[in-house]
Amino acid sequence: MKLTKLETFGNEFVCFVRATTEDGAEGWGQVAPYCADITAQVLHRQVAPHVLGRDCGDIDALLDEVRDREHKFPGAYLRRAMGGVDTALWDLRGKREGKPVCALIGGTPGRLRTYASSMKRDITPADEATRFVRLRDELGFDAFKFRIGAEVGRDRDEWPGRTEEIVPAVRLALGDGVALLVDANSCYSPARAIEVGRMLEQHGVSHYEEPCPYWEFEQTKEVTDALALDVTGGEQDCMMANWKRMIEDRVVDVLQPDVCYLGGIARTLRVTRMAEAAGMPVTPHAANLSLVTLFTMHLLRAIPNAGKYLEFSIEGPDYYPWQVGLFRNDPYRVEGGEVTVTDAPGWGVEIAPDWLARSRYAVTERSG
């Protein structure tokens, strides 16, 4: 079935994609969040010309054609735009076959354990610990991730002593029966990362994300080799050569592809298969409640090397005001610390019509 139309609906933060085939079938996807208005332009300028009028049965091959035809643009924006088409086509296929996407890629609907993921660095250790306790008691989370260091901080903390304060504060508040994860967002040199890592190990932290600048694989591997806890990373990487090297060299212990940053489900499945062959778990990055978390839910219900949990953002309108009102039905209800992938066809979600009506619209159709 040939793809005949691609439409985008969005703003600078989030942009949804509607794909339509020659028989009128439709599917919804999303480009990666942030600067999504720029990504929408890339989709219409550099992706649509290569996929419209083409058979969309083989999503992998279709997106490889875009990669090859746009070989002078190997970076993130092209992959972010490709992901919008990929995810729309998976939804379209699921609706055509009456199956959820997870079933199309070898899985089944069902429940997933989550970890409550904090995005805040401007929060005090006491306030972070307090809200974690509340979320544990109200929603049943038994795993929590919080921020340490400063984002790409060159060994600096968000404020002096914050990291050394927040780690024991959270552990004390939640007790030993809860998994703790931290994200350094590329903060540290190897020596400082290892020093902080030793402190994390003493407090039972099990997941240490992006300790060093994520592009410095040798630095990250030095930390991985020195510590017993899981060093994790990969969310930023969109090139298959980087993933191949990351896996072959065991740069990290746990891989964290982002479905939207990487270019969609088909490309993410390539990474998960490489990881499976190497015996490495995959705990994807899904840092907000646009469609990326739903994409990740379907993925984790299908791959054999899924990690322990789904990343689930706990930030509301004060941090992500653009998340409000995106969907007519809520796919993100947490019960007992778990979320559920339903058996509804495709992604199983409907974009809110009033949100679409307020968004910035563009369309590219097959000429002739």
Image: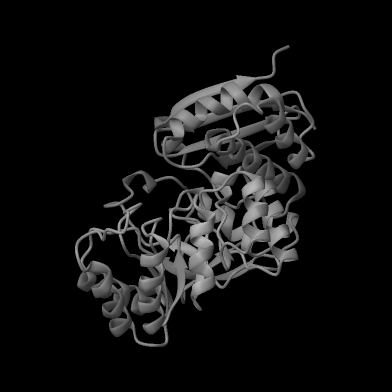
Q: Is residue 209 visible?
A: yes
Residue 242: image x %, image y %? 62, 49
- Examine the rendered structure and indicate whether residue 279 appears above or below residue 353: below
> In terms of image quadrants, where is residue 176?
bottom left
Q: For this rendering, which residue is in front, 12 or 24?
A: 12
Q: For this rendering, which residue is in front, 65 or 330?
A: 65
| Residue ID at (53%, 34%) | 77
12 with respect to 18 (left or right): left
131 with respect to 110 (left or right): left
In this view, the residue farthest toward the top is 368
Residue 86: image x %, image y %? 65, 40
| Residue ID at (74%, 42%) | 60
- Quarter of the image with the C terminus is top right
- Quarter of the image with the N terminus is top right
> In terms of image quadrants, where is residue 143?
bottom left
- Examine the rendered structure and indicate whether residue 110 appears above or below residue 3: below
| Residue ID at (79%, 40%) | 58
Residue 238: image x %, image y %? 58, 44
Q: For this rendering, which residue is in front, 241 or 221?
A: 221
- Examine the rendered structure and indicate whether residue 312 appears above or below residue 237: below
Q: Is residue 334 visible?
A: no
- Examine the rendered structure and indicate whether residue 247 appears above or below residue 30: below
Residue 316: image x %, image y %? 32, 56
